[in-house]
Every structure is written in structure tokens, then in C-alpha cells.
Amino acid sequence: MAYNPNIPLVSNLMVTSQPQIQSNFQTINSVFSKNHSSLNNLDPGRLQGMHTVLTLRPQSTDPTTTVDQVSLYTKTVAGVTSIFFRPSNNQTPIQLTYSSIETGLQSEDPDVFLPRQYTFLAGPFIFYVGRVVVTDGTIISLTPNSTLLYVGLTMAEGGFGTDKSSAAATNINSGGTNFTVRFPFISTTDPTPVFYLAIGQ
């Protein structure tokens, strides 16, 4: 039987409503136990009612919060569902997670890291790091998309802006995550390894 919130009716005889009441209790117990310790679990470490997993459905809009409330929820950004925290009194929501599909190893033994990496701190900033082998004038597009605030480049043998072997980032896209690699102090058309550090918002 499907769950019926209208049982028992005043006019129902016990023999009539008993099967539906029993079905309701069984349904409640089954649904509750999907993300919680079961109602009759007496294990001190997993008492009934405790969450075993928290599943959040994406929201179409940011929830409202009063002066004594905060909200933890998910919504979709650029096709990726992420966790958000909204402070009290409808303050600006803070994104807590980003997808990490481009972070980590592309192969092991020996470890070979993906050439483009990024990390994320809760708040408005995204940090990108990586190594690319490029020629002068190459345009680099970082993901996930953001508004770049800073880009620092260096060639393998130099430090960030410390000598004439350093590379430079130009044409930093204020509306996206693109920049152009330039080698202002060297003349070469050969592909050259470059390390980058970028901050986006």
C-alpha cells in the first residue's frame, strides 16, 4: 500500500484502517532509515535519528535566512552541483565546493600529474597552479571559469618575476579565465616549459 496521511478517518472501523496504519508505519520506518540510523537502533555510537548520510537536492534559488538562521544547501553552477553556505540575515552566499575533475594524477608509477591543476578555498577565491609547454603568444584558458585577479608566470629556471628569464602574462581577461603567455626578454619559437600561479574570483 502507498503511504496514506488521511488514516484513520473518524468513520473508519479499526478492522478497516488497521492494514493502512500498519503500512504507513512500515513506510515511515523504511524512508527514515535511508539516511538515518533506524528508529530502533540502540547502538550508543549510532542512536536512532542520527544521520548516516546527508543528501541535499539542488535549489533553484538561494534560500532566505533570518538574523538567527544560517543555511547549508546545494545549487548548480555551470552544470556542476556545489555546496553553499548562506550566513544569517540573507548575507552573500559562500560557495564551499568546486568540482575537481582536472586535479590529481593522470598516471602512476611514476606519478605524472595533470598539467593543469587548481584548488579551492571556501570563499570567493580560486587558486590555479600548473605547468604548460608553450610558445610565445599562446593563450591559456583555465577551468573552472572565474574572473582572474592575478597571474604569475615563470620559466623552469627562473623565479616569479626575479630575472630576465621570467615569462609574463598579458591580456588577462577580466571577464573570464584567459591570459596570454609572453617571453619579453628571450627570442625563441621553441616550446618552452612555463609554471603559472593564478587567482580568480
Image (cartoon, helix red, strand yellow):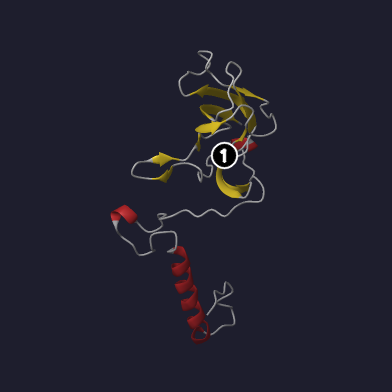
Quarter holding the C terminus is top right
Apparent side of residue 174 relative to residue 164 in the rendered image (left or right): right
* Residue 127 visible within the image: no
Q: Nearer the viewer, residue 196 or 123?
A: 196
- Identified by mark 1, the residue type is Gln
Does 114 sit above or below residue 151? below
Q: In x, y percent, where is residue 50?
A: 40, 54
At x 34% / y 56%, what residue is drawn?
A: 47
| Number of residue marks | 1
Q: In x, y percent, where is residue 166?
A: 53, 18
Q: In x, y percent, where is residue 3?
A: 54, 74
Where disc 1 sits, the SS reads: strand
Residue extending farthest to the right is 175
At x 42% / y 59%, what residue is drawn?
A: 36
Q: Which residue is mark 1?
A: 95
Apparent side of residue 198 relative to residue 41 in the rendered image (left or right): right
At x 29% / y 58%, what residue is drawn?
A: 43
Does 2 sit above or below residue 130? below
Neighbour tally class for label 1: few under 14, some 14-19, many 20 plus, Cα within 10 Å: many
User: Based on the displayed image, in which of its 4 quarters is residue 141 positioned?
Assistant: top right
Q: In x, y percent, where is residue 35?
A: 44, 59
At x 59% / y 21%, what residue is drawn?
A: 183
* Residue 30 visible within the image: yes
Does 98 sit above or below residue 1? above
Does 134 sit above or below residue 110? above
